[in-house]
Amino acid sequence: MIDTSNENKDRQDLTQFDEIWLFGYGSLIYKVDFPFIEKIQACINGWQRRFWQGSHDHRGTPEQPGRVVTLIPAKKDDITPCHGMAYRVSPEVFEHLDHREKNGYLRHEIAIEFKDGSSKQGLIYIADEKNPAFLGEASVEDIANQILMSRGPSGENSEYLFKLAQSLRVLNAVDHHVFEIEARMNNDLRNCTYLSETAK
């Protein structure tokens, strides 16, 4: 089983930060199971959200991993920001978060942009293509099908997709990748319902 929690503990000296901001772009937007001092809608630039990371411990299993989002560098001509939530937190929360994000995610420093135009240096979890759980690019159809078939200790993989899409809408954020997979998933579910009803 992949476990990056110990590696993350050595990546930054959290005691050197005057204040610590954490940027969430996936389940950290809607599943806030950690204490925070302040929460603000924010974005980052130069990154794109993608369902390219495997989930062996939350939304899937080692035998049938689900798919969750990570970030990839944006193309040079893509200036669309990646929207999410920023949390001001204490160093103690990373004991929990490092464990939660242990399946291939590493902590990085990143510039977080706030709606008032200000910017702060913060932390983010990213699972890059070098980590063993990285699944990589696939078609919208294949990603939707894998999500539809996957479930793990944290629940259905489809729940992750739908909650993320809904959370982005609440933020008035458009993410074509997420919304295309959501639309495909809804279509697949309608087809499953139709086939089930016609088989009766």
Image (cartoon, rainbow, N blue to C red):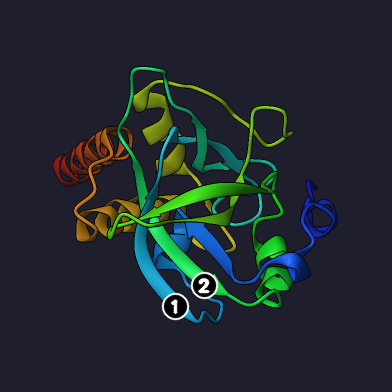
Per the image, label 1 sits on a secondary structure element best described as strand
Residue at 45% across / 68% down in the picture? 31
Task: Decide if residue 53 is on the left or right side of residue 105.
Answer: left
**Residue nearest the viewer, comparing 51 with 28:** 28
For the point 59% across and 57% down, the residue is 58
Is label 2 in contact with label 1 (beta carbons under 8 Å)? yes
In this figure, which residue is indicated by the disc labeled 1? 38
**Mark 2 nearby-residue class (10 Å; few <14, some 14–19, many ≥20):** some
Identify which residue is drawn at 41% across, 38% down: 45
Q: In the image, what residue type sits under mark 2?
A: Arg
Residue 197 percent across, percent down from the top left: 16, 46
Q: Could you tell me which residue is drawn at 14 percent across and 40 percent down?
A: 198
Point out which mark residue 88 bears.
Answer: 2
Residue 147 x %, y %: 43, 41
Q: Is residue 93 left or right of residue 72?
A: right
How far across and down, in percent of the image, does residue 176 sit? 26, 33
Count the marks: 2
Is residue 159 among the parts visible in the rendering? Answer: no
The answer to whether 118 is drawn above or below residue 62 in the figure is below
Give the Cα separation between the discs numbered 2 and 1.
Answer: 5 Å
First of labels 2, 1 by sequence position: 1
Report x, y in % for residue 70: 52, 40
Q: Is residue 142 above or below residue 123?
A: above
